[in-house]
Image (spheres, helix red, strand yellow):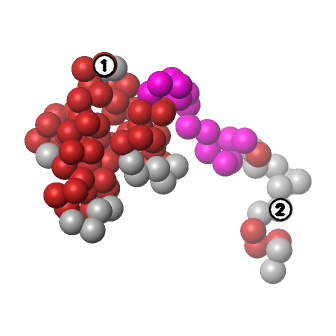
Amino acid sequence: MAWARSIGPSTLAMVNAIIEGRPHPEQGYRSSLGLLRLEKTFSRARLEQACLRALYFGMRTRRHVVHILENKHDLLRIVEEDDVFGSHANVRGADFYH
């Protein structure tokens, strides 16, 4: 946990998600260590961004983080729904459909 905390809050949250997502916490230790070792291949900053992106989209495994890093998706901006559709008179919203 201290190693994950030293990288950043998103990495710590990802390690917690990996450990809590297993029936027995011990099953998540190896996966968590593998996640933290990605810091050597990539950088701390990229690992932190990849964890942030994975958590934002509900991806909670080391494999997802590896995929994000290998495809350089951590370098992309996370686009909010409002940014895509904008807010103008033609966007009705969820309240319109009751």
Residue 27: give x, y in percent of width and height.
22, 56
Q: Looking at this view, name the residue that lies furthest to the bottom.
A: 98
At x 29%, y 62%, the residue is 22
Q: Mark 2: which secondary structure?
A: loop
Q: Is residue 16 visible?
A: no
- Is 19 situated left or right of 42 in this image? left
Q: Residues within 10 Å of mark 1 (few under 14, many from 20)?
A: few
Viewer-nearest residue: 75 or 87? 75
Q: Tell me what residue is drawn at x 68 percent, y 41 percent.
A: 83
Image coordinates of residue 76 in percent, x first then y, are 55, 27
Q: Residue furthest right?
A: 90
Q: Secondary structure at mark 1?
A: helix
Please say if 48 is above or below 83: above
The image shows residue 56 at horizontal and vertical percentages of 48, 48
Q: Which residue is mark 1?
A: 41
Look at the image and say whether residue 76 sits in the magenta stretch. yes
Tell me the crowding category of disc 2: few under 14, some 14 to 19, or many 20 or more residues within 10 angstroms, Cα based: few
The magenta segment is: 69-84
In the image, which disc is placed on residue 72?
Answer: none
List x then y, in percent, for residue 66. Answer: 41, 33
Circles 2, 1 touching at the beta carbon (< 8 Å): no
**Residue 19 in view:** yes
Q: 74 or 36, which lies in front? A: 36
- Residue at horizontal 32 percent and vertical 48 percent from the top: 14
Disc nearer the start of the sequence (2/1): 1
- For this rendering, which residue is in front, 49 or 39? 39
Residue 92: image tag = 2
The three-letter amino acid code for the residue at tag 2 is: Arg
Estimate the spatial distance between the alpha carbons at disc 2 and disc 1, rounded to whole Å. 46 Å
Q: Quadrant of residue 33?
A: top left
Q: Please check the rendered image and state whether residue 21 is part of the magenta-colored stretch, yes or no.
A: no
